[in-house]
Amino acid sequence: MGEIATEEHRVTADTSYLWHEAPVPPGLRVTQVYGWLLCPDTVRVLLLDNAGVFNLPGGTPEARDDDLLAATLAREALEEVQAVIRDPVYLGYQEVREPGSAPYAQVRMTALIDSLGPRRPDPDGGRMYRRLLAPVGDAPAILGWGEPAVAQAAAVGRLARARWGLRVDAPGELAGYAD
């Protein structure tokens, strides 16, 4: 994969996010693994809704994940949105630069959803998230992450077509909750 970088989105005047379609360099700490989880039937992405604040399923790598990014994603998807996933694929990482701290990486992956179980509270904090299935092209605006999310969605589209024969840009179903 050739490296693609964007640095358009800023959360604050001093924090920047730089998207890389490349492996995380040695020495760059990975603080999160989030997934663009696709429903293979509707080709929509699963977003979690925390009282109107949207995110991708995922979280912090833990020792029990044995340093495997796919294990972190599978565990977090099951805990947060009760999604069983298959065929997780690395997309790239977001390099985060904040004043007063060393840069760190936020990994992004994609995977297919095998099944969604009944909603239940996340064991980490007890929150119960709603599950929004949305067209991949709509996800960046729903997430509110700016240009890095647009670049990530484009990477999901390329990979979904090449690996699974799915077209995320094909006319399909509108966003809707899977509760």
Image (spheres, rainbow, N blue to C red):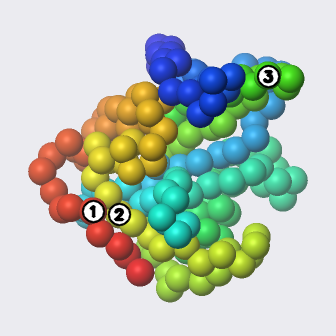
Q: Which mark is residue 175?
A: 1
Residue at the spot x=63%, y=30% of the render?
12
Rounded to the nearest angstrom, the CA distance separating label 1 from label 3 is: 37 Å
Dot 3 amino acid type:
Pro
Q: Which numbered disc flags the more N-terminal residue, 2 or 1?
A: 2
Q: Is residue 48 visible?
A: no
Circle on res. 30: none
Q: How busy is the neighbourhood of tag 3: few (under 14 within 10 Å), some, or many (20 plus)?
A: few
Marks 1 & 3, CB-CB < 8 Å contact: no
98 lies left or right of 74 = right
- Within-10-Å neighbours for mark 2: few <14, some 14–19, many 20+: many
Q: Nearer the viewer, mark 2 or mark 3?
A: 3
Q: Residue at x 79, y 22 (%)?
A: 99
Which corner quadrant holds the C terminus?
A: bottom left
Identify the amino acid type marked 1: Ala
Q: Mark 2 near mark 1, Cβ–Cβ under 8 Å?
A: yes
Image coordinates for residue 96, horizontal then vertical, percent: 68, 27
Query: In the displayed structure, would residue 66 be above or below residue 154?
Result: below
Residue positioned most to the front: 13
Q: How many marks?
A: 3
**SS type, badge 3:** loop
The answer to whether any part of residue 54 appears in the image is yes
Sequence order check: which comes first, mark 2 or mark 3? 3
Q: From mark 2 to mark 3, how far is it between C-alphas?
A: 35 Å
**The residue tagged with tag 1: helix, strand or loop?**
loop
Task: Provide the secondary structure element on which disc 2 rests.
Answer: strand
Identified by mark 2, the residue type is Leu
- The numbered mark at residue 133 is 2
Residue drawn at x 66%, y 75% is: 127
Q: Which mark is residue 99?
A: 3
